Amino acid sequence: MSNYEQMELNITLDGERELKENVMLSVEFAYDQLKSYDLPNVANRYEGYGIAANMWSQLAAKEKGVKDSMKHFLVTLDIGEQAAIETASSLYNSVTEVVYTATNMAAHVNKVMNDLFKVYSEIEEETPIEKMIEDGNDDGFEEAEEKTEENTEAEVQEDGAE
């Protein structure tokens, strides 16, 4: 059992993985565009929340468009193929708007996060992770010793001596 190793099988399709990478690239691209506008830095968490809330309300409005398109699609099922095609086109456009708005929101939230981290870094000399590492050295637990043949032989001798 000492040679047992927990393995994880990643069954994500290459296409799905590439799509996620491309979404992340889109968000990075949107963030770079946002930085090029030379917007003022986010001063505090309240301002950051305001920006995020504004973006969220825009996203919610676009999501409502998708919801309305889906309702309309259901209504057009009895009408015919042409109406379904037009409604599917409307749904496609609504979903595309949601994706665009979500990407824009992710870019704005990334800016909020980075600006707040800069503000926090100026106040605090250590990052939260550095503090955790420093404080984590004395958590009351001891690391288990690695089992070697010498340790095993010493345990056998101790057990035999008793």
Image: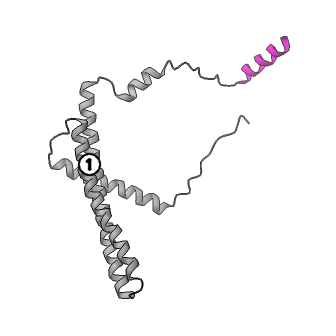
Magenta stretch, main secondary structure class: helix
Residue 143 picture location, percent across and down = 59, 22
Q: Is residue 133 above or below residue 60?
A: above
Could you tell me which residue is drawn at 21 percent across and 40 percent down?
A: 47
Q: Nearer the viewer, residue 124 or 50?
A: 50
Mark 1 lies on a secondary structure that is helix
Could you tell me which residue is drawn at 64 percent across and 22 percent down?
A: 145
Residue 31 picture location, percent across and down = 25, 50
Q: Is residue 138 above or below residue 15?
A: above
Q: Quadrant of residue 95?
A: bottom left
The amino acid type, in three-letter code, at marker 1 is Ala
Which region shows up in magenta?
145-162
Instruction: Name the quarter where the N terminus is drawn.
Output: top right
Q: Read off the residue under disc 1.
A: 53
Residue 29 appearing in the image: no
With 18 as the anchor, is 108 left or right in this view? left
Instruction: Name the quarter where the C terminus is drawn.
Output: top right
Alpha-carbon neighbours of circle 1 within 10 Å: few (<14), some, or many (≥20)?
A: some
Q: Nearer the viewer, residue 50 or 42?
A: 50
Residue 70 picture location, percent across and down = 37, 72
Q: Is residue 1 above or below residue 85?
A: above
With 74 as the anchor, is 2 left or right in this view? right
Could you tell me which residue is drawn at 15 percent across and 45 percent down?
A: 39
Q: Quadrant of residue 88?
A: bottom left
Q: Is residue 110 above or below residue 160?
A: below
Q: Is residue 158 magenta?
A: yes
Q: Is residue 51 magenta?
A: no
Q: Nearer the viewer, residue 77 or 137?
A: 77
Residue 9 picture location, percent across and down = 59, 52
Q: Quadrant of residue 45?
A: top left
Q: Nearer the viewer, residue 159 or 116?
A: 116
With 142 as the anchor, is 30 left or right in this view? left
